[in-house]
């Protein structure tokens, strides 16, 4: 794609965004709605439309070269990301579930399940590549320095003399057998040659017979090859055999080279743009600075005179906190400015009175509310209904679209084919910056000049005003002093005398900072579930699919950690729990979070903390070090493996020496210290959450993602992708459908272990002579225990006792009771009619 095509894609995305903002604005002003189904439909449509725009803008930002355009796209892109997270949070609070299903809405918007995948912006890692490489070098250097911890000791097993003699005998007999077989094969080949020589000399074929013989052999070979090819094509067409990935053509290879070369051009243009910012600002200072200073001084002097003529006295110059002289010329007359200054003084007087009155009124209101709550109960919530919460990201999106309209929407750039930056726009921006800096200097001069004027003209009035000001200043100072005393509570820095580099080195050598595996979120294989909506309509709670898990990891982990704007303004998630059976890929998702965002990985699992930094003071020192380094080198992920051990109901006897509950008291305190500007996420993983005390456990991990065992579609894709990744040739004899059916209940870890056991290097070399079959994978699978239904039910029962699970069960009970009152059949018909009407409306819009 060329620059113009990405420009058209940007324009199309901005047009879709403007239409979406027009549709979303009325919903912010609507009265509270009681129909939860209708509310979810509106939220889901907004979510899918934002997701579609997110896909387009991410591609545009990744490939567009113009540095000024990229800044506008970045602003809108971060606003769209944040709005996606907000809408997801709204849907969770509405349905009391982390997983949502959009099957019917996808059909109306003519979207495919792949469109639901949340794209991960490439700039999260690419723009920090140098820093990440330096960090990797430092990590490898520290690990090489303390190499004793990296190399694991291998125990050598001793062997008895009888066992050694037996092994030597077996190997020697095998060698002699091979030699004997080779010798007999040579004898047999010589006898065959002799027999062929005797028969050829006795009976010679004529040329016609020889030709027909050759034709028969060739035609048989040709037809067999054609039939096998047609059968293979038919099986691929039916989906019984996966198609082999074709090698990329020359055009595709050239397109990939162009895409990668654009990233180099982006860096070059950005460096030129940064140099131009400095040089243009210096030229504006030297050329336009004196003129700006003179005009500002003349304007302020003119304002002095006009205020003197209008009010009979010189005005008070605004403070720097109020905007200085910039607040004077905000399209106001001298009379309006004087009235504003007088109104400010009156407001300050009224504030002190109002604060005193508020304390008494608040007590009365609280008493009235408590009385009202006792009698009503849950009826107030039902009367309130649902209302869209105000967004923190819509203003940035609106501002970005406005900038696009005013600057880039109708701009003719035919002459700027190479997409260099616009010098005129830079000059205008720098002129405003210079004007602000000059204004600060001019304000100081004009304040002094105004004091001199007051001394000369209004001496008596000036003295009185000064006395009043001094008294007020003293009061303010006293108030400030009293306020300072209250805010002296700060956390002690236990490592104030140490550098971040030394703390980082200590944590690496002690094993608390580990190197994450290079795993992407797309490597977490799993298919989409097409029955989610239909099951929920039948009052059956479906198990989420692995693609839904990927979406949650992207929304709750990757987007907030990768973008400072999303983390600061969006819903704050301090801790995340990944739970599910062993082998479903919980640790893999933790490593994927690190690779997609370039985050540090801290390991605070009970196994790593055992025996290190003993005592309360030692534990506080360790947590202080971890959180300090995590904040300084953000984004950071603090991983706690076997998270249930920290909140054990009863510690087993074998684990008492490890002290797994060391972090129980201190972890909530340190979690509270994580602020919105700190891109730090605590991620816990567990396959036995029911061993933990659920109340403190859920207070720490407020966001819980229950990862299920893979369904049939996910297992089929897992077998196919994993076998191909390890060099297996997928032929007709390898029935993947049967393997996927047989492995019902097995996790990704089970399947991976079976593949590794079968696909040895020797077996891979034999594939051409002996193709792979599905039966070969059954023995290694049979040695492993699958996830039984009873275990899955225990996970579901545990999740129903979590805060969100309780809300979900209460909501389902309330809906069932309402259905019993109104009649199930009528309710079902009404819901179907409502869905059909909404789908018709969407189709008309599209």
Image (tube, rainbow, N blue to C red):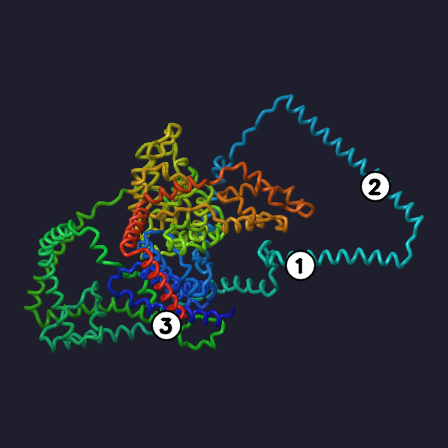
Q: Earlier in the sequence, mark 3 or mark 2?
A: 2
Q: Tell me how far mark 3 sits from mark 2, CA to CA.
A: 90 Å
In the displayed structure, does residue 227 sit left or right of residue 549? right
Query: Which residue is labeled 1 in the image?
Result: 230
x%, y% of residue 33? 26, 61
In the displayed structure, does residue 323 sit left or right of residue 762? left
Q: Measuring 52% from the left and 63% from the top, which residue is drawn there?
A: 259
> What is the crowding at mark 1: few (fewer than 14 residues within 10 Å), some, or many (at least 20)?
few
Query: Which residue is labeled 2 in the image?
Result: 189
> What is the crowding at mark 2: few (fewer than 14 residues within 10 Å), some, or many (at least 20)?
few
Q: Which quadrant would residue 624 be assigned to in this image?
A: top left
Q: Earlier in the sequence, mark 3 or mark 1?
A: 1
> What is the crowding at mark 3: few (fewer than 14 residues within 10 Å), some, or many (at least 20)?
some
From the viewer's side, name the closer residue of 447 and 794: 794
Residue 401 shows in this picture:
yes
From the viewer's side, name the closer residue of 320 and 462: 320
x%, y% of residue 305? 15, 77
Q: Measuring 53% from the left and 51% from the top, which residue is drawn there?
A: 717
Q: Which quadrant would residue 18 be assigned to in this image?
A: bottom left
Q: Measuring 25% from the left and 76% from the top, which residue is drawn there?
A: 295
* Foreground label between 2 and 1: 1
């Amino acid at each position: 794609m060329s620059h113009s095509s990405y420009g058209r894609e940007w324009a199309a995305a901005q047009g879709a965004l403007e239409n979406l903002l027009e549709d979303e604005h009325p919903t912010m002003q609507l009265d509270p709605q009681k129909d939860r189904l209708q509310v979810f439909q509106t939220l889901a449509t907004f979510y899918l439309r934002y997701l579609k725009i997110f896909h387009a803008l991410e591609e545009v930002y990744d490939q567009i070269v113009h540095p000024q355009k990229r800044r506008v796209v970045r602003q809108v892109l971060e606003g769209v990301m944040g709005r996606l997270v907000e809408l997801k949070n709204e849907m969770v609070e509405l349905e009391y579930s982390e997983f949502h299903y959009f099957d019917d809405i996808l059909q109306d918007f003519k979207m495919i399940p792949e469109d639901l995948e949340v794209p991960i912006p490439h700039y999260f890692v690419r723009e920090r590549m140098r820093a990440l490489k330096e960090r990797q070098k430092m990590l490898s250097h520290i690990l090489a320095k303390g190499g004793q911890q990296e190399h694991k000791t291998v125990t050598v097993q001793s062997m008895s003399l009888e066992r050694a003699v037996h092994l030597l005998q077996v190997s020697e007999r095998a060698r002699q057998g091979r030699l004997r077989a080779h010798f007999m094969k040579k004898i047999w080949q010589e006898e065959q040659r002799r027999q062929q020589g005797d028969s050829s000399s006795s009976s010679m074929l004529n040329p016609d017979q020889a030709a027909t013989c050759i034709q028969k052999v060739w035609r048989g070979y040709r037809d067999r090859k054609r039939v096998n090819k047609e059968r293979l094509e038919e099986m691929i067409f039916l989906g019984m055999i996966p198609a082999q990935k074709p090698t990329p053509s020359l055009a595709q290879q050239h397109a990939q080279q162009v895409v990668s070369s654009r990233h180099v051009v982006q860096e070059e243009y950005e460096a030129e743009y940064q140099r131009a910012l400095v040089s243009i600002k210096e030229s504006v200072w030297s050329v336009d600075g004196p003129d700006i200073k003179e005009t500002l001084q003349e304007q302020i002097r003119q304002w002095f005179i006009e205020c003197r003529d209008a009010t009979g006295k010189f005005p008070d110059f605004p403070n720097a906190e109020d905007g200085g002289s910039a607040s004077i010329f905000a399209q106001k007359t001298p009379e309006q400015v004087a009235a504003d200054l007088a109104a400010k003084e009156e407001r300050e007087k009224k504030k002190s009175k109002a604060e005193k009155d508020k304390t008494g009124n608040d007590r009365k209101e609280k008493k009235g509310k408590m009385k009202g709550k006792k009698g009503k109960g849950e009826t107030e919530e039902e009367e309130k209904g649902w209302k869209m919460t105000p967004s923190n990201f819509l203003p940035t999106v609106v501002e970005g679209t406005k900038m696009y309209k005013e600057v880039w929407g109708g701009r003719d750039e035919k002459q700027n084919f190479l997409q260099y930056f616009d010098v005129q726009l830079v000059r205008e921006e720098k002129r405003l910056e210079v004007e602000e800096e000059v204004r600060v200097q001019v304000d100081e001069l004009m304040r002094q000049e105004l004091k001199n004027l007051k001394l000369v003209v209004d001496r008596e009035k000036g003295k009185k005003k000064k006395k009043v000001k001094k008294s007020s200043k003293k009061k303010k100072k006293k108030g400030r002093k009293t306020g300072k005393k209250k805010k002296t509570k700060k956390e002690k820095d236990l490592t104030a005398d140490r550098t971040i580099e030394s703390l980082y080195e200590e944590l690496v050598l002690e094993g608390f900072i580990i190197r994450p595996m290079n795993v992407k979120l797309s490597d977490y294989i799993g298919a989409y579930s097409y029955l989610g909506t239909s099951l929920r309509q039948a009052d059956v709670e479906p198990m989420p699919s692995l693609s839904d898990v990927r979406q949650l990891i992207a929304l709750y982990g990757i987007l907030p950690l990768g973008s400072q704007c999303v983390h600061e303004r969006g819903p704050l998630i301090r801790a995340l729990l990944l739970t599910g059976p062993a082998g479903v890929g919980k640790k893999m998702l933790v490593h994927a979070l690190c690779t997609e965002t370039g985050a540090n990985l801290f390991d605070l699992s009970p196994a790593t903390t055992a025996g290190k930094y003993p005592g309360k003071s030692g534990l506080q020192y360790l947590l202080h070090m971890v959180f300090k380094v995590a904040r300084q080198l953000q984004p950071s992920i603090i991983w706690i493996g076997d998270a249930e051990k920290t909140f054990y109901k009863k510690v087993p006897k074998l684990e008492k020496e490890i002290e797994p509950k060391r972090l129980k008291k201190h972890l909530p305190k340190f979690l509270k210290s994580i602020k919105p500007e700190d891109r730090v996420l605590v991620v816990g993983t567990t396959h036995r959450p029911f061993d933990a005390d659920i109340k403190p456990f859920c207070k720490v991990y407020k966001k819980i993602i229950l990862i299920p065992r893979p369904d049939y579609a996910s297992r089929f894709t897992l077998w196919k992708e994993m076998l191909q990744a390890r060099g297996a040739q997928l032929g007709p004899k390898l029935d993947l459908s049967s393997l996927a059916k047989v492995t019902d209940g097995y996790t990704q870890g089970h399947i991976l272990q079976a593949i590794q056991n079968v696909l040895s290097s020797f077996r891979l070399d034999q594939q051409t002579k002996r193709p792979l079959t599905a039966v070969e994978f059954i023995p290694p699978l049979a040695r492993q225990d699958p996830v039984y239904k009873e275990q899955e039910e225990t996970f579901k029962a545990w999740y129903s006792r979590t805060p969100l699970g309780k809300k979900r069960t209460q909501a389902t009970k309330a809906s069932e009771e309402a259905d019993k009152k109104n009649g199930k059949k009528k309710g079902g018909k009404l819901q179907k009619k409502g869905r059909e009407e909404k789908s018709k409306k969407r189709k008309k819009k599209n």
